[in-house]
Image (tube, rainbow, N blue to C red):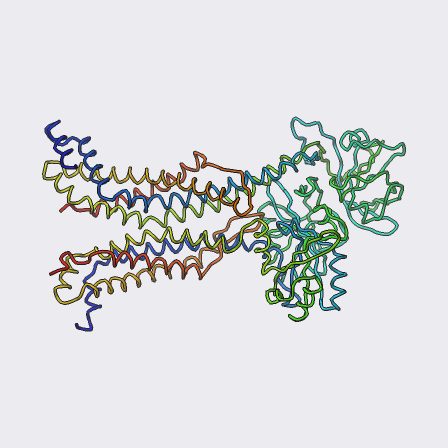
Amino acid sequence: LPSSAFPAFSRASSKKIYILLSISSFAFITAILINAGFIESLYDLSSSMVYPSNPPTPHYIAVSSYSLAPFTSIVSMSAVDSILKSSGGAAVSTIYEVLAPVEIGSRILILRGISRGNLSAVAGSFSISGEEFSDACMDCLWIGSGIAEELGLRINDTVILYSIMTSSPYFFKVKGIISSSSPLDWELLTNLDAARAVRGIGGSEASIALIFASNESSLGKIAEAFGASPEKSGILEKALLALRYSGGNLSASAYGSLSSFYLSRLGISRSLLYAVLLSVLILLAIGFYYFGKAVAGSDPQSFSILHEQGLSVKRIKLYSLLLSSLSAAAGSLSSFAASYLIFPKLGVSFLGYAIHPALSSEFLALGFIFLLSFLSLGIYASEVVSFEES
Amino acid sequence: LALTSERKAKTQEGSLSRKGLLRTLLLVLLRKDALLILLLVSSIPAALSASYSLLSPVFSEEARGSLSLLGERPSLSLSPSQPQNATCAEVYALSAEVHSSSFSTEAPAFFVSSTAFEEMFGIPLPQEKPAAFLGSSISSLLKAREGSIIEVCSENSCSSYRVSGVLGSSSFPSSIFIVDGTFPNEAPAYAEKLYLCPSNAESLIEAATEDIEGSLSSIAAILSVAILSACFPIIFIGFRRILSLAGRDAETLLEVGAPRRSLKLSLFFLVYALSASMFAYGLILGIFSVHFSLWALRLFGIFIESRPLLSPSQSLDLFLIYAAVSALAAAFAARRWEIA
């Protein structure tokens, strides 16, 4: 066989079907990426809410109570402080945060309470227009610039918000608008005392504690002081300790991430979400079996001629697969590029946060693999030449 | 089978009527695995988009169920305008500097008449007026209890009040109420007039679930549209495959005198109608699989009672998107279809 068989084959075969295959791969991969992206973003929401944007050290853990969400958690600050003391000063610093869901003009948003000194650690780089953040104030509110724009709120406006936790109204004055690249842009911000009143917890309680250590071994010591099993300290980086109070005793279990903990409380694990996504992917990819058949049957006449010229059926199928892989790859890659450009603009508001689908290269790869598998099944299951025996 | 019905149609009316043609083509399609192809290309996207659309109804039913206990809690609402069908009390609100012997902070202060205060909070007033009532949080911050003296200042004028009581923990925890017999003369001119009305948490929870349901259903809508439009090329390929399967029978029909144009139109119509019914079947399949999954969750210890159905408008929306996508696919497929 001449070495120029493949170029000859590609010249002879119908272009239209491969163009259609590219478009089809583009649509399929985009649908998969949007699916995976939204589920991933919703999944990671609680982590992105709680983890600091500018941590003082890269080694930290979040401490939550055994609850359903960051804003239903209650952590006793005195209990955390006394445990940290018993760990022998392994912690560099601790940040307490209060998170509460509030209703404002039939929208549900998150109100975050932090102390002034921790603002830059939580928010990362930020700027405030209006009054500076203050700790001694029960009716002061700073509003994320994204939400301020959406609700049309300005400095010195009066805001009446309702706490879902206490179902009481709260009277606030907008003291400033805060702009940052962190989730704070979509939240309401106030100090710890005012947020505690909204959350309905006492003066020595918080929703979440973030504990920072100078290195990983100190982090392990802290986890041990909390009673978490030391063999789990390997997963502690940025992880979570869930505290359980029972009979006056406090015990902690370590989790790989915040989101996995909260969702596991709901009975949903990350692997279950992936299983759902994978089955969606496979169901959508089944159609490519018929595409494979269409590719193989696209041009029986020229295939027959090529076959008569000495190109074996095996070769014809192989070349068809090669050409269709190339066009599917072109479609998939351009879908990935388009998603990269479009996803930041494709946002849905959830609890005030603008949720953009996350771009997942794993699902690009998985989608492409399943697409190719069904495509090749289709190609190999069909007859490419009308009279194979001749 | 196809040929016998062809002959029947021919003998009945002399030449092939449109009805006979449709019936014959339907038999051809049913014989040619067309249903299996349509099942794959139409039912799967239908089932997936139906499952996504059920996401938000499941959530809101569950959330309403678990929050309904909270909803019975009596509460007060505060609004800048007088709501209809409610007996409300006027209050004057301002931001005040509050000082106690040990602490100072800024807090909202409400000036209210004694009758209104008694009506809204159900707390009998002490003899001494003016009286100050503190929310639970501000009371513990100021370390002020019943009998303590606090100073309330705004715009450089201060007054001292004796604390007459502390409100319950879930009502205005961060506020101060100044109940004054000579009200409203003592309320400063720059205070904001608001209406305090009795309510319960029901409307609050309704708003909360509606807001989250709205977010979830817009995500579900994006996912459904993405899936349905991703299926366009597959639907097109499926239709083309069916048309090519029916090709030889169509030739026979042409030979027995069926007009080419009406043959093409009938086939187009039939494939389209069959795929629409497969789509409807897929929607039902999706609902069924969601119900089954919700039921199966009890095996993992999660009890979800809601078994939502697609609302007529949801099904219609999905159906219209599919109808548009598949009409386009069918038109493309039919245009390229050549008999013999």
Q: Residue at x 25, y 54 (%)?
A: A293
Q: Residue lying farthest bottom?
A: A3
Q: Residue at x 46, y 42 (%)?
A: B292
B186 with respect to A150 (left or right): right
**Which of A113/A234 is in front?**
A234
Q: Residue lying farthest front?
A: B299
Q: Is residue A130 visible?
A: no
Q: Is residue A166 visible?
A: yes
Q: How many marks?
A: 0
> In the rendered view, would you say A24 is above or below B186?
below
> Which image quarter holds the C terminus of chain A?
bottom left
A248 with respect to B200 (left or right): right
Residue A229 occupies quadrant: bottom right
> In the rendered view, would you say A223 is above or below B301?
below
**Residue B191 placed where, x, y %?**
76, 39
> Which image quarter holds the N terminus of chain A?
bottom left
Q: Residue at x 62, y 52 (%)?
A: A144
**Residue A313 placed where, x, y %?**
19, 63
